[in-house]
Image (cartoon, rainbow, N blue to C red):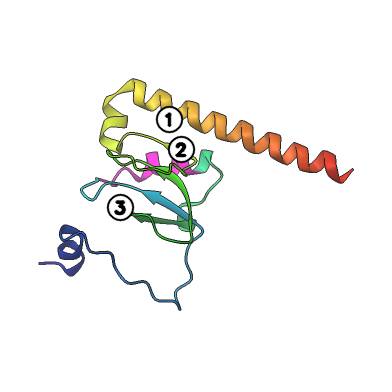
């Protein structure tokens, strides 16, 4: 049995070396999530102005990185993610879930633009 699969099945969090720089963003998914649809994930992250190389993917919160997308079935509080959606399989099957994700992305971008405009106006 693969060591990683065994640790995942036991719900054991892997130790992270302090030497390895942590990526700034975190995408949360279920333990059994199928993340093979890289195109869809890339598209969502691109819309959020985030490169996939900047993201850690995990099924649990990690101290440090900003949670940008929570696609777990069971949501936990506090909700700190930029966007919260159903798992990828549900997003592809249910139009309403996908529509809700796009609305959140739009709201996040609007908020980000308003903040950047506010900072620009304060500097002048």
Instruction: List x then y, in percent, for residue 31.
Output: 23, 51
Picture layout, residue 53 above or below residue 106: below
Nearest to N terminus: mark 1 or mark 2? 2
Q: Main secondary structure of the magenta part?
A: helix
Q: Report which residue position mark 3 lands on.
A: 59
Looking at this rendering, what residue extends furthest in the left direction? 1
Separation (CA) of disc 1 from disc 2: 7 Å
* Dot 3 alpha-carbon crowd within 10 angstroms: few under 14, some 14 to 19, many 20 or more: some
Q: Which mark is residue 83?
A: 2
Magenta range is 34-45
Q: Which of disc 3 and disc 2 is earlier in sequence?
A: 3
Quarter of the picture holding the C terminus: top right
Q: Position of residue 107 (x, y in %)?
A: 56, 29
Left or right of residue 23: residue 114: right
Residue 28 left/right relative to 93? right
Q: Mark 1 = which residue?
A: 101
Q: Mark 2 near mark 3, Cβ–Cβ under 8 Å?
A: no
Number of labelled discs?
A: 3
Q: Which residue is outermost to the top? A: 96
In the image, residue 95 lies at what x, y percent?
33, 21
């Amino acid at each position: 049995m693969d060591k990683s699969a065994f640790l995942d099945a036991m719900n054991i969090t892997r130790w992270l070396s302090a030497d390895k720089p942590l990526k700034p963003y975190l995408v949360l998914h279920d333990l059994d999530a199928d993340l093979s649809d890289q195109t869809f994930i890339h598209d969502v992250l691109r819309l959020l102005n985030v490169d996939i190389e900047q993201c850690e993917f995990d099924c649990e919160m990690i101290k440090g990185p900003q949670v940008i997308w929570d696609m777990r079935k069971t949501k936990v509080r506090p909700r700190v993610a930029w966007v919260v959606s159903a798992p990828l399989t549900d997003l592809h099957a249910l139009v309403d879930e996908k529509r809700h994700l796009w609305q959140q992305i739009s709201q996040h971008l609007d908020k980000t633009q308003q903040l950047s405009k506010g900072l620009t106006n304060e500097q002048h």
